[in-house]
């Protein structure tokens, strides 16, 4: 049985490449006042000896704020990874990756603490060429 798997009734999450291990510093892509987030743990990872727990897009992590408003610093916040530079495969066979690693601070229910996230368009690889979507 998979250690990373979801419950049977809630549906399965498609497996993506995990590009952000514990210790990674990612950008904060919301308007809470935090500039970057330091990943200290990944929710739902049990672990293996000498293997760092890693997160991918859509995973909930526990993070601290390294740069930002003083009231956010020196505390542990739940966050969700929304962008990663490591390419991952969608179900339709397309490989996606972003220009940076980013996450947003959420509450324990998974609702965003700030307003809308600052988004970036993904880069799509099909074969050898790289396509940049135009947003239309």
Image (spheres, helix red, strand yellow):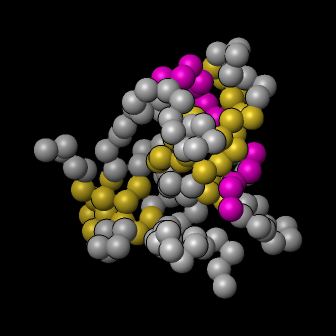
Asked which quadrant contains residue 76, the reply is top right
Specify whether residue 42 is painted magenta: yes
Q: Is residue 74 left or right of residue 107?
A: right
Nearer to me, 106 or 86: 106
Above or below, comparing residue 103 to residue 122 in the picture = above
Above or below, comparing residue 100 to residue 35 in the picture = below
Nearer to me, 127 or 78: 78
Specify whether residue 21 is painted magenta: no
Q: Is residue 129 visible?
A: yes
Q: Residue furthest right?
A: 49
Q: Which residues are magenta?
A: 31-44
- Residue 136 coordinates in the image, percent (x, y): 13, 44
User: Which residue: 58% across, 25% down?
Assistant: 35
Above or below, comparing residue 33 to residue 133 in the picture = above
Question: How many numbered badges does the structure rendering display?
Answer: 0
- Residue 5 coordinates in the image, percent (x, y): 60, 73
Q: Is residue 122 left or right of residue 104?
A: left
User: Which residue: 47% across, 47% down?
Assistant: 83
User: Which residue: 43% across, 26% down?
Assistant: 115
- Residue 26 coordinates in the image, percent (x, y): 59, 39
Q: Residue furthest top?
A: 70
Q: Report the predominant secondary structure element of the magenta stretch.
A: strand
Nearer to me, 104 or 87: 104
- Residue 8 coordinates in the image, percent (x, y): 54, 77
Q: Is residue 19 visible?
A: no
Q: Is residue 77 left or right of residue 49?
A: left
Quarter of the image that includes the N terminus? bottom right
Q: Residue furthest left?
A: 136
């Amino acid at each position: 049985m998979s250690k990373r798997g979801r419950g049977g009734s809630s549906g399965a999450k498609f497996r993506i490449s995990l590009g952000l291990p514990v210790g990674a510093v990612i950008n904060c892509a919301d308007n809470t006042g935090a500039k970057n987030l330091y990943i200290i743990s990944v929710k739902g990872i049990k672990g293996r000896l000498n293997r760092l727990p890693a997160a991918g897009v859509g995973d909930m992590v526990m993070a601290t704020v390294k740069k930002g408003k003083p009231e956010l610093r020196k505390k542990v916040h739940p966050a969700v990874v929304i962008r990663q530079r490591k390419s991952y495969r969608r179900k339709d066979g397309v490989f996606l990756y972003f220009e940076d690693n980013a996450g947003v601070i959420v509450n324990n229910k998974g609702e965003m603490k700030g307003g809308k996230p600052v988004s970036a368009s993904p880069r799509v690889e099909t074969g050898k060429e790289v396509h940049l979507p135009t947003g239309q």
